[in-house]
Image: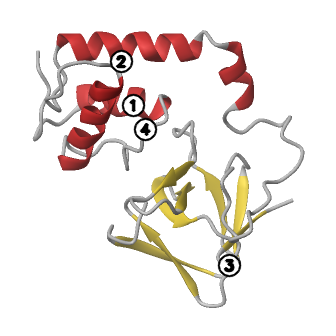
Amino acid sequence: MILKRGALGAKVREIQYQLERLGYNIGRFGMPFDEQLEATIKAFQEEMELAIDGMIGEATRLKLQEAVAAIENSTDVNQNSGYSAENKLPPVPNELGDFIQGNWEQWRVTCSKTLNARSGPGFNYSIDMTFPSGTMLMLHPEYRYPIKFDSVGKPWLVVSYQGGAFFIRANQRFIEPVV
């Protein structure tokens, strides 16, 4: 079975999980197979030296499974990614105020007004919700890599609020880790 743009359902979600596990930016889980997912698949296919068609055929499906299995069998990756109680020091922003490491369980909104939460990582995504200053947010549990980068390289943090996944700008002007 070939998956391509327009597909919906559990098989698309499984592909999204596999790509996110490999560090690709897939946006929100459970979305239809759209242009962004097609571009992500093309990037994966190019990296793996597969035929680049943006579809999930047998060769791409097998290569995805192999790549995910390789990561899951790597003890270094399993020990150094994701939030764990062993991460005792909160992330520190870089010189631009951006948080490049987002593996911290709880975050607080610190901006003076409200913080826009978007449907994907970048200002070109729709605003789904706004959080007032002081709102406590948790990392979204389904994302192994909580920091996603937009098209210009700015980091966005994937947080969970009332069961939904939202992307917020990962910068100290807007959020801080709760210690």
Q: CA distance from mark 2 to mark 1?
A: 8 Å
Q: CA distance from mark 2 to mark 3?
A: 37 Å
Query: Looking at the image, what colour scheme do you see?
Result: secondary structure
Q: Which residue is mark 3?
A: 173
Q: CA distance from mark 1 to mark 4?
A: 5 Å
Q: Which residue is mark 2?
A: 64
Tell me if mark 2 has few (under 14), some (14-19) or many (20+) residues whose alpha carbon lies within 10 angstroms of its own. many
Q: Residue 64 occupies which quadrant of the picture?
A: top left
Q: Which residue is mark 1?
A: 19
Q: CA distance from mark 3 to mark 4?
A: 26 Å
Amino acid at the residue labelled 4: Tyr
What number is the disc on residue 117?
none
Pinpoint residue 42: horizontal percent, then vertical percent.
Answer: 24, 34
Q: Are marks 1 and 4 in contact (CB under 8 Å)?
A: yes
Near-viewer residue (161 or 92): 92
Q: Which residue is mark 4?
A: 24
Q: Residue at x 25, y 31 (%)?
A: 12
